[in-house]
Image (cartoon, grey):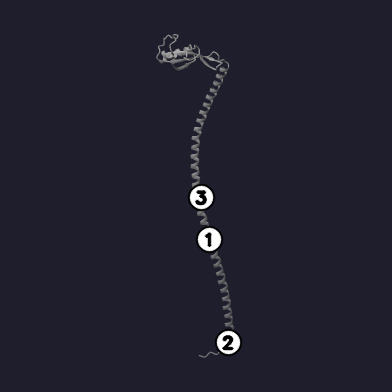
């Protein structure tokens, strides 16, 4: 079958073809634009997703660090509380010891004060008394000095503790040497000129050969 195409129809076909090509180009441009927008959006979404992931990772890192630091701080607080309890216990013990020491110190100070008062009293008493005429009694045992007493009566009373009977009668000694007597009393009297004590009864001087 032979189809005759006239000039008018050919022109219409060419015009339809031109319009179709123009439409294709228009659609291509729209497709390219839509693809560009899609790619841009995809890039932006990818960037946002990566930023969000990085922020989440940093947040997780910060969270881990914060948890580790909080754990360390809690352990440090427990250590400090234990140290505080030990310090308080030590403080209580030291307080008890210090309290006892302060009481003992107070008692010692009172005793020292009383001793100072007694010493001052005795010193005043000694200043008010003259030493002139003071006498002492020396108790001799077989001629050897044994004990010094303030009075002969004290010496006589004390010899009972050394084996002498309580009713022993003391008699004046003769001229025999002191070693001849088990117990013998010698009186000494203070002499201010010599600032010392001298025997009340001096023995008779012995003749020394060759002495004039």
Q: Marks 3 and 1, Cα distance to the nearest angstrom?
A: 24 Å
In front: label 2 or label 3: 3
Check the image and report above or below for 167 versus 36: above
Query: Based on the displayed image, in which of its 4 quarters is residue 125 positioned?
Result: top right
Residue drawn 58% across and 84% down?
Answer: 14
Classed neighbour count for the residue bearing mark 1: other residues with Cα under 10 Å, few (<14), some (14–19), many (≥20): few
Residue that numbered label 3 is attached to: 70
Residue that numbered label 2 is attached to: 10
Residue drawn 53% across and 63% down?
Answer: 50
Q: Picture coordinates of residue 167 (x, y %)?
A: 41, 9
Q: Picture coordinates of residue 52 (x, y %)?
A: 54, 61
In front: label 3 or label 1: 3
The mark that comes first in sequence, 1 or 2, is 2
Local secondary structure at mark 1: helix
Do tag 2 and tag 3 residues touch (Cβ < 8 Å)?
Answer: no
Q: Picture coordinates of residue 112 (x, y %)?
A: 53, 25
Numbered badge on residue 19: none
Name the one closer to the observer, 160 or 67. Answer: 160
Numbered badge on residue 54: 1
The mark that comes first in sequence, 2 or 3, is 2
Do tag 1 and tag 2 residues touch (Cβ < 8 Å)?
Answer: no
The mark that comes first in sequence, 3 or 1, is 1
Q: Marks 1 and 2, Cα distance to the nearest angstrom?
A: 64 Å
Name the one closer to the observer, 45 or 161. Answer: 161
Classed neighbour count for the residue bearing mark 2: other residues with Cα under 10 Å, few (<14), some (14–19), many (≥20): few
Local secondary structure at mark 3: helix
Residue drawn 49% across and 44% down?
Answer: 79
Check the image and report above or below for 104 versus 190: below
Classed neighbour count for the residue bearing mark 3: other residues with Cα under 10 Å, few (<14), some (14–19), many (≥20): few
């Amino acid at each position: 079958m032979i189809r005759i195409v006239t000039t008018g129809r050919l022109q219409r076909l060419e015009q339809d073809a031109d319009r179709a090509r123009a439409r294709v180009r228009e659609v291509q441009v729209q497709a390219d634009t839509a693809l560009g927008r899609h790619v841009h959006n995809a890039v932006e979404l990818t960037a946002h997703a990566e930023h969000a992931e990085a922020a989440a990772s940093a947040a997780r890192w910060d969270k881990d660090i914060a948890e580790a630091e909080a754990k360390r701080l809690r352990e440090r607080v427990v250590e400090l509380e234990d140290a505080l309890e030990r310090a308080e216990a030590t403080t209580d013990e030291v307080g008890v010891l210090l309290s006892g020491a302060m009481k003992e110190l107070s008692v010692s100070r009172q005793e020292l004060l009383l001793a100072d008062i007694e010493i001052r009293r005795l010193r005043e008493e000694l200043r008010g008394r003259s030493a002139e005429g003071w006498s002492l009694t020396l108790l001799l045992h077989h001629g050897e000095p044994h004990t010094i007493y303030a009075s002969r009566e004290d010496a006589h009373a004390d010899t009972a503790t050394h084996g002498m009977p309580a009713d022993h009668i003391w008699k004046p000694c003769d001229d025999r040497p002191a070693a001849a007597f088990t117990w013998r009393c010698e009186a000494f009297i203070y002499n201010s000129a010599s600032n010392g004590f001298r025997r009340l009864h001096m023995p008779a001087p012995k003749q020394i050969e060759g002495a004039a």
